[in-house]
Each structure stands twice: as C-alpha cells, then as structure tokens.
Amino acid sequence: MGTRQNLNGRLSQIVDELVHQGVTLEQARQEFERQFIVASLRSNDWNFCRSARSLGVHRNTLRNKVSHLGISTTEGRIRSTGGRPPLRRVIAKIQG
C-alpha cells in the first residue's frame, strides 16, 4: 500500500506541474504513453512480443502505437546491441 500511495503522491505533483504549465490532457497522455512504451521496450531488449505481453496489448497494437507516437525502433535497437547492428542484418549482409 505504501508504494501505491508514494506513486499517487509523485503523480499528483507531476500532474499539478503540467496543469500549471498549460499542458493539455492529450499532450500529457501521449508523452506518458510514449515514455511508458519506450521503458518497456528497453527492459525487454526492444522485443515487441515480450513488451506487448508485459503491457497487456497485442503486438500489432504496440507496433501501431510506436508508429503513431514516433518512437524510433532503429535507434533503440542500435543502443540495445551496444552500437552493433542487429544480428539478422549482419547475417543478411553475409548471405546477400
């Protein structure tokens, strides 16, 4: 229960600040959703199936949201592989 109260307290402070700054509900919702999705993708090594499962949405819904919110999956994959291209791209280059 303490964690939930702490979260509600922090969220309340953020909401108050956003309202004070004139941020619209739509702007706040989109930014929250964007950051939540990116955090899930990062924690799942940019694996859409695992991220979708952890978020409780279908993977196609997640892909649509990523596209709509302008989340760059290429950038995330490069970061998650330490700057190296994904293995399947390397294999395709070797085979092609």
Image (cartoon, helix red, strand yellow):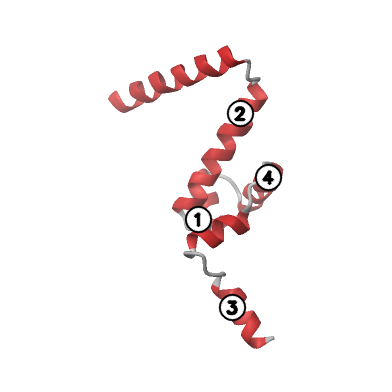
Q: Earlier in the sequence, mark 4 or mark 2?
A: 2
27 shown above or below 38:
above
76 shown above or below 30:
below
Which residue is under mark 4?
70
Q: Which secondary structure, mark 3?
A: helix
Residue drawn at the location 54% of the way across and 74% of the way down: 87
Q: What is the CA distance from the residue labelled 4 to the residue labelled 2?
A: 14 Å
Q: Earlier in the sequence, mark 3 or mark 2?
A: 2
Q: Earlier in the sequence, mark 3 or mark 1?
A: 1
Question: x and y percent of residue 83 in the render?
Answer: 51, 65
Residue 29 tag number: 2
Q: Nearer the viewer, residue 2 or 12?
A: 12
Residue drawn at the location 44% of the way across and 17% of the way down: 13
Q: Could you tell me if the residues under marks 4 and 3 are in contact, i.e. CB atoms within 8 Å?
A: no
Question: x and y percent of residue 56 in the render?
Answer: 53, 44
Q: Residues within 10 Å of mark 1 (few under 14, many from 20)?
A: some
Which residue is under mark 3?
90
Q: What is the CA distance from the residue labelled 3 to the residue labelled 1?
A: 23 Å
Amino acid type indicated by mark 3 = Val
